[in-house]
Image: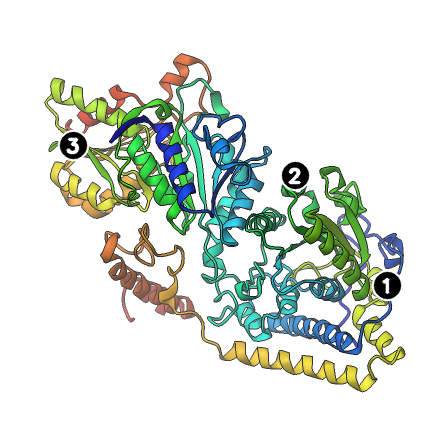
Amino acid sequence: MAEMRYREALGLALREEMHADERVFIMGEDIGVFQGAFKVTAGLLEEFGERRVRDTPISENTIVGMGVGAAMAGLRPIVELMTINFSLLALDQVVNCAASIRYMFGAQVAVPLVIRMPQGAGHQLGPTHSHCLEALYLHVPGLLVAVPSTPADARGLLKAAIRDDNPVVLIEHETLYGRRGEVDTDDDEPLRFGEAAVRREGSDVTIVGISRMAETALRAAEPLASEHAIEAEVIDPRTLRPLDLDTILESVRKTNRAVIVEEGWPHGGVGANIAALIQEQAFDWLDAPIGRVTGADVPMPYSRPLEAAAFPHEEHVVQAAIATFRGR
Amino acid sequence: MATEDASGGRGTSSTGVEPASGGRGPSSTGVEPASHSLPDRETCEAVLAKMLLIRRFEERAGEMYAKAKIGGFLHLCIGEEATIIGATQALRETDYVLSTYREHGQALARGTSPEAVMAELFGKAEGCSGGRGGSMHLFDSERRFLGGYGIVGANLPLAAGVALACDYSQTDDVTLCMSGDGATNQGTFGETMNLAALWSLPIVFMIINNQFGMGTALERHSAVTDLSRKAAGFGVPGSRCDGMDVLDVHATVTAALEKARGERAPQLVEAVTYRYRGHSMADPEDYRTKDEVTEWRSRDPLEAFPKRLVEEQALSQEDVDRLDEQAAKAVDAAVEFAEASPFPELASLYDDVYVVGEQVRNPWYSTDSRSPETHRGEQERDAGEVARELAEAGAAHEEETDPGTREARSRGEGG
């Protein structure tokens, strides 16, 4: 076991998998000489050289497309994009190519590509650098989507993503990069996609937290227990495609209440999707309408107090959990 | 020789924008006619046979579309045969080719059987993409034909990625990426040229300039109309060839491939050509005049090339007729095969969305709105059964034309 930061855990996974497989290489904007916008790739250029750690021009659609092409021709590329907002320039390659190619060409080819990018508000980066868009990628058949929230999950899911033969969108979080956590560095086994983590057991309400909101939900569970005598069960799905719906349903059948917390927008969001699935498959177990806590339905503002008001905090989660106990 | 029916436009436009008349004729492109000597007899025969196969295949595909055997869009390459064959004949077997949605000819040129291509157009299980891709998305991994792409310019980054893999793996395979004139206006064009030059990738970009981006003429969509110059600013030098002259295309692409392969210097080749048919089958061709089409037809590679072969006694007229007959027979067989091939099983709907492995342990895991089950792990197949039954019921519903019966079925009555 070793304690390390989330960014270091990601860097470790990259290093381990690049050592294990010559076909793995990484490319992206400022990942080499600059050491990465968020320092995830720090030291990689020195260790692996320019053939395998490739600084690219600012051409998101093309570098993702080249990743797809290189994957089709037998390599295992990792593409780092600087933020999820920039990935919108590459949506054509992600949706029309990476996700579709295997299916539309009759399974003659696979696309073992990993696209990594951070998302999230909290650093006053305004409306073009702060959004949470995991719902966009969740929408697309053919992609796997991971949203790790701890250093151990970040390493385990990135290793799994690199070894898998499907295109994976791995969404990191800017606020989490500095978080410390225990990582079992002796264990080389990757995590499994589609296996949620129960972060806290509880009998009264199920709280599903997405990406950084898994952490926020866990913090909210403390005042819920100490001040409101509500024992929350906190679930971090860890991956959205595939989604471990069974663990969520099992919990809801126990607690009879559910709240989904995400940082992204409410309409067409991850919470909307999970709420639909819960009501389809566990309607009879629900004692209250499913609660959703989401980011505000606005482009992310720059000003500090406005930004803080635009994404969920513990208090929002506490209120939403309490609301499931009120008669409506 | 060429029996392709003229289908030129009406010569007038309802938009007020005059279709250029003769302004885009073959004499106005700035491409000087070349004078290459003929290759050996065997090569001449192989080249002509392939060009004939494409022409006859495309004509028949058009007929099959008119008979509703083929759905969706159908983009024919009639007129571009010399461009396609001149380029692909210059390749090694291990080189890669990526193309656009007008790519039946490229697949045939690389050796994909006419049966597999026609079956794909018919949406059949034995099509070269299993009926999943259709006319715009042909693929043949065995022959390193890595696809037709329905998004203009999308194949450029993909091709550069393939070239990157070749370079990374230290092979001397080259990637030939074919795009249309319209693709030179996409952002991926400049981005890809820059990256290809920056990383010294073994790639040749071929711009098939057929004078139109869909219905918008070259001079109305590109400020620079000599497209061979368009990548130079990004570090990719260009050359032009006469796309109606198979030998000129071959010579130009051969030289470009040599530079890309040997010197790791990416190249661009513009082939100036013309498509005789509309952009797709759904094209009234208001944007050009019949005279213009006729003028280009006077340079039809399937008139000019065999005529020259006979004149220079490389082949006899009997040889030419025999090759044409063989092409027609191959296409007959392709139609027969496509007709007989089954449609894909409805139960295969969810297959191959994912590679089954550690992270996706079943053919599909998704939650389908038509199936009320929980989908994960081993329950997946059962849920697939439910989805299949519902899909079959849906298909039966679609085929039922009587509104009363359809309504009854919707209510769950009568089958």
**Of labels 2 and 1, the one closer to you:** 2
Question: Residue A134, position in %: x, y?
Answer: 39, 36
Q: In this view, does B408 lie above or below B229?
A: below
Q: Is residue B205 in sight in this rendering?
A: no
The kind of residue tagged 1 is Glu
For the residues bearing labels 2 and 3, Cβ distance under 8 angstroms: no
Query: Residue A159 at x, y = what percent?
Result: 36, 42
Marking on residue A205: 3
Considering the numbered disc 2 on the image, is that residue within a helix, a strand or a loop? helix
Query: Going by the picture, which residue comes out furthest to the bottom?
Result: B318
Inspect the image, locate mark 3, and give the three-letter code of the amino acid beneath it: Val
Please check whether the numbered discs 1 and 3 fall on a single chain.
no
Q: Residue at x 38, y 30 (%)?
A: A264
Separation of residues labelled 2 and 1 (CA atoms): 41 Å
Q: Which of marks 2 and 1 is nearer the N terminus?
A: 2
Q: Disc 2 is attached to a residue of which chain?
A: B
Q: Nearer the viewer, mark 2 or mark 3?
A: 2
Quickly name the residue at label 1: B295
Q: Where is residue B242 in the image (x, y as percent from the top left)?
A: 82, 59
Where, quadrant-wise, is the C terminus of chain B in this rendering? bottom left
Q: Which amino acid does label 2 sit on?
A: Leu
Q: Is residue A200 above or below residue B7?
A: above
